[in-house]
Structure formats: structure tokens, C-alpha cells
Image (cartoon, rainbow, N blue to C red):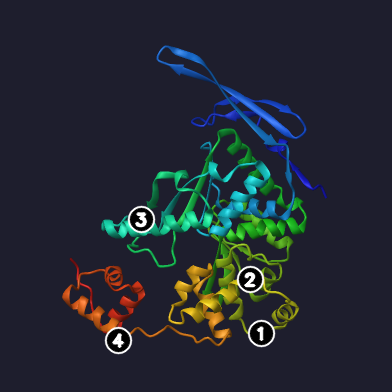
Amino acid sequence: MNQNICMKEFVPEKALCKKDSNKGYELNSVDDGIYLNLGYEVDTNNQFGCSGKRCFSLALPKYINRNLETFEVLGLLQAEMGKQHDGKIVFCNHEHRLVNKVIIWFEKEFNLLKDVWKWYVKVNINEPLDHKYRREVEEKVITYWIKKSGLSLQQAYPKKVSYIKNTMNKKLRFYDYGTLIIDYASNLFSQIIKNFVKEMTNDMLLYEKCEIRAFLRGILAGESCVEIHNPSKKFRVHLSVTNEDEKLIYHNCLIKLGVNNIIYPLDKLVISKKENNLELLKQKLMTLSPKKYNKFLRMMSLYNDFEGLKEWRYNLQKPYNKVPQKKINKIVRLHNRHPDWPAWKMAEQVGVSAIKVQRVRKESDLGVGRPKTPKYIIAKIIEIHNQNPSLHAYEIAELLGVHVNVVWRIRGKYKLKKKAF
């Protein structure tokens, strides 16, 4: 198997105009064996007419690695990258591991440094009218993404946080940090990458099974949704794909790997039934997105045991995406120092989920459940609420130095209703 992919195959004959895709510019190319040195010229105009020419150039690596990482990123780009011709590479996701994977791949394969990416965050709530709450939301999501992605504040757009109008959501959930949208503006390079993604995807069935498997990991990380409906015992994974040609490619790739699925015209591609979900499990097709993989494993655990699942469990030697032992040790040390800390606070310190902290506490016999709120805190919350029932929960939490969930729980338990202004 060839260990490289030649990027020359994806270079267009002409560089398309960013504003008019029907207009193109002659592309000059010099191949030195390592780089493809590309360039084109554009007429510049002023009030008197044509005033000269502007040159654009690009040094593109002739070869990139043909490995599983490339096929995983290819799947992510196919799922989450903007396809329209706008002179930019745009990628978005709500999981920092996937965003970082794409950034690192571009740096490794195309020498595209992290500091060239512009970014902003989109949150799924209406723009808050309360300026204090708006500042709180924006500070929370911006701090999170700078910390997790390593992008700097200087690379952000002037409007760092974007809101959604067509939603009923008014408050941002505690563990919701929005979706990070990154983009890199380069007209010619964006055309080459979009050609690369499109043509590689169209030819995916011609590649090795291990490469198809890696590609589908990226697709499922970006496009899939895990459905768990206990009353009807409906456990399935679906792909929301609008393009019928792309849907057929995914369908055939899954069939080639032995995963049967159903295409619903003008709707979803659905993977259901135990034997097909078990194939997703065995072939580790859901593992690229930690959040979706965790939900998928929870779904699989709801099945009654059957022969195939028992065999997989028996053969499993090491859990995939296991939290390192040093993080587990850190959780234990933090608990010993601060046994009254809630799981969420410890999770932020260690860099794991609150669920993992709860599991470690249980496995290490450190005590489970929430620490009880002191009676004087409860009395103080009730007193402040009675004095000013229109206060937001987060305002009371700030006054007392407790978590906002404590205020919500006390209000719910003692039926303290918040009044409108």
C-alpha cells in the first residue's frame, strides 16, 4: 500500500474567484519534488480602471501521510467542514479533542500553524438581555475554549460569542460550553482541501477496510446521534445527512464493514438491531468522540446479555479511552484534602468529567453522593429569597459563595418560587 497521498491530484486547473465561482484565474505550478509552488494573478482596479496586478502564491506539500489519522480527520472534515465556495476552511465542533485533532493534523501535514486560525464560539441560547448574565456566559465559554484549544484571544473575531435567535433556550446549561468555529482564509488552499475531501470521499469504497473504518470513525464523531428510548427498547445510531449521494456512500461503507443500516429517503441513515450495534462496538467505530462513545456504551449496557456481547466483553483486555492512572490518583488526593468538594469542582481541577470523579470515589470507597448543604446556608438562601424573590439563582450563589445548583435545589425543595421583575 502506498504510504503517501499525492496532493497534486486535488489541485484545480484554475483558481476560482472568491466572489464569483464562475470566474477563474490561470494557475501557475512548479513541482520541485517536495512542494507544489502554486500562484495566480488578479487584476486590481481603481476609479480610473485597471491599476495593476496582485499575485497570490501557495507552497503546498506534494505528499501527505496516508495513515489512519488522515482518514479520521478526512471523516471529520467531511462531516463538519463548510462545503460552500467562500475562500475559507471552516470547521466547527463542540468537543475540544476533535477540534484539536483537526488543528494538529493541519499543522503536521501542511505546516499550518495554530496561530493562523480565527475563531468564535456559538451558543445555543438567545442573546441575554441581562448584561451581567451575558458577561458571565461569555467569560465562561471563552475561558473554556482558550484553555482547551490553546488558541489565543488575539485570534478571535471581534464578536467572540454568537447567539441563536430561533431557539427557546434562555439559559446556558452548566456543562454546555457552546460550539467552537475555526476558520482559515486562503482562497486557493481552501479549494484544494475541499477537492481533497470531496474526491477522497467519493472514492472511499476503493480503499482498504482499515482506512474506511477510520473514515467512518470521523463521520460518526461528527454526524451521528445515539438514540436511547427505554420504554420502546429502541436503541439505535442515526446519521443526519441531507445529501443523498453522501448518504449512499456512508451506507455502502458500513455494508462493506458488515454493519447493516437503513436509508430513509430525504431523512436519516439508521443503524439499529443488536448485531449491528455490536459491530460498531467491536470495530471501535464510535470511539473518536468521547461524549458519543460514552452514551453509546451506556446504550449497549442496556441490552440483555447475548452471546456476541459476552464474547466481546471476554476478549476486551484494556478499556478504550481509559483515564490515566495519575488522574485517578489526583482525584483520590484531592478528595482526601477536600472531602466536602462536589464532583464538578474536583472534575474541573483534574480535567475529567464529574461522572468519572463519582466513579473513582465509589470504587475507592471514598463515599458517594452529594455533601449535605449546612443548615445555616439553607437558612440564608431562604432568607435572601424571601427578602428579594426576583433575584436569579446565580446572584444568590455569588453572595453566599456556593454553587448555583445548591440554590436551585433549595428553592425546589422548599417551593420558593422566583418572581419576575
| Pointer 1 local density, CA inside 10 Å: few below 14, some 14–19, many at least 20 | few
Can residue 307 be seen by looking at this rendering? Answer: yes
- Mark 4 residue type: Lys
Instruction: Give the number of the mark in front: 1 or 2.
Output: 2
Q: Mark 1 — residue?
A: 305
The disc at residue 375 is: 4
Q: Left or right of 401: which side holds 14?
A: right
Residue at 63 percent of width and 84 percent of height: 304
Q: Mark 2 — residue?
A: 324
- Mark 2 residue type: Pro
Dot 1 or dot 4: first in sequence order is 1
Dot 4 or dot 2: first in sequence order is 2
- Mark 1 residue type: Asp
Residue at 54 percent of width and 58 percent of height: 96
Instruction: Give the number of the mark in front: 2 or 3.
Output: 2
Q: Left or right of 343: which side holds 98?
A: right
- Mark 3 residue type: Asn
Q: Relative to 375, does residue 210 appear above or below in the rendering? A: above
The disc at residue 166 is: 3
Count of numbered circles on the image: 4
Dot 1 or dot 3: first in sequence order is 3
